[in-house]
Image (cartoon, helix red, strand yellow):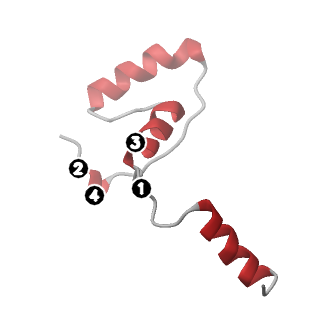
Amino acid sequence: MLNTANTQGIYLNVPMTDWVLLKELIRKFGWQAETREQLLDRFVKSRSKNPSLTEDEIMEEVNAVRYKK
């Protein structure tokens, strides 16, 4: 079991020809790997379906701060 409290997240660009070898190392060491797409998908799924602010409210706040309107 991977202790997530003691892990360091990294992003690697790996040639497709080396991906099989890297996946084998990941499996042998018990590490976890996910693609950028998987990471983004996980983030999107974790977001609230009902945001506390609407886009209009956000723009009103930006305008009030930036342009003092």
Residue type at mark 2: give it.
Answer: Asn
| Secondary element at tag 3 | helix
Residue at 44% of width from left, 48% of height from top?
A: 9
Residue highlighted by disc 1 = 50
Measured Cα–Cα span from mark 1 to mark 3: 13 Å
Residue highlighted by disc 2 = 3
In the picture as drawn, the residue positioned furthest to the bottom comes out as 68
Image quarter of the N terminus: top left
User: Could you tell me residue 60's position as x and y percent?
Assistant: 68, 74
In the rendered image, the vertical position of residue 26 relative to residue 58, given as above or below: above
Which residue is nearer to you in this view: 60 or 34? 60
Residue at 52% of width from left, 66% of height from top?
A: 53
Quadrant of residue 17 within the rendered picture: top right
User: Could you tell me residue 42's position as x and y percent?
Assistant: 41, 40
User: Could you tell me residue 4's position as x and y percent?
Assistant: 28, 51
Residue type at mark 4: give it.
Answer: Ala
Q: Is there CB contact under 8 Å for labels 1 and 3?
A: no
32 to the left or right of 16:
left
Residue type at mark 3: give it.
Answer: Lys
Residue highlighted by disc 3 = 45
Residue type at mark 1: give it.
Answer: Asn
Labels 1 and 3: the sequence-earlier one: 3
User: Could you tell me residue 67's position as x and y percent?
Assistant: 82, 82
Measured Cα–Cα span from mark 1 to mark 4: 30 Å
